[in-house]
Image (cartoon, rainbow, N blue to C red):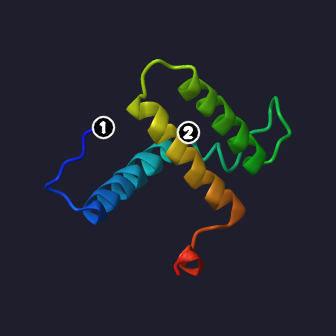
Amino acid sequence: MEYIEKETAQEGIEKVCNGMARLLSEKNKRYGNSALEPLRVFSRADAADGIMVRLDDKLSRIKNSDKLRKNDISDLIGYLVLLCIAQGWTDFDDLID
């Protein structure tokens, strides 16, 4: 794997998180908040369970793929962020030692 040495890890973390925030906000607008407020036409699963099903599907796709794809990883990160929101986990200061 290639890591750009000009950046510190902290700068990389901030870039990835900020980029993901922009991507997730745009996707959420396009999908009408469907992950957190599903229509429940075919499934009665709550938001968290629906997100976990999507995580399972995405992990299966990654496992069965020959190549690691940026889109799959960004989807995985996105679903994990949405799961945190569904669980009410929006503050992580308590995890800092």
**Label 1, label 2: how far apart the Cα atoms are:** 33 Å
Q: Position of residue 75 (x, y in %)?
A: 51, 38
- Give the vertical position of 69 relative to 36 (above or below): above
Q: Which mark is residue 55?
A: none
In the shown orientation, is residue 23 left or right of residue 5? right
The residue that appears at 39% across and 33% down in the rendered structure is 70
Q: Which mark is residue 31?
A: 2
The residue that appears at 41% across and 28% down in the rendered structure is 69
The residue that appears at 45% across and 51% down in the rendered structure is 25
Of 88 and 38, nearer the camera is 88
Tell me the quarter of the picture where residue 49 sits: top right
Q: Amino acid at mark 2?
A: Tyr
Q: Amino acid at mark 1?
A: Met
In the shown orientation, is residue 87 left or right of residue 64? right
Q: Nearer the viewer, mark 1 or mark 2?
A: 1
Q: Which mark is residue 1?
A: 1
Q: Position of residue 79 (x, y in %)?
A: 58, 45
Outermost residue toward the right in this view: 44
Quarter of the figure with the N terminus: top left
Q: Which element carries disc 2, helix, strand or loop? A: helix
Of 18 and 43, nearer the camera is 18
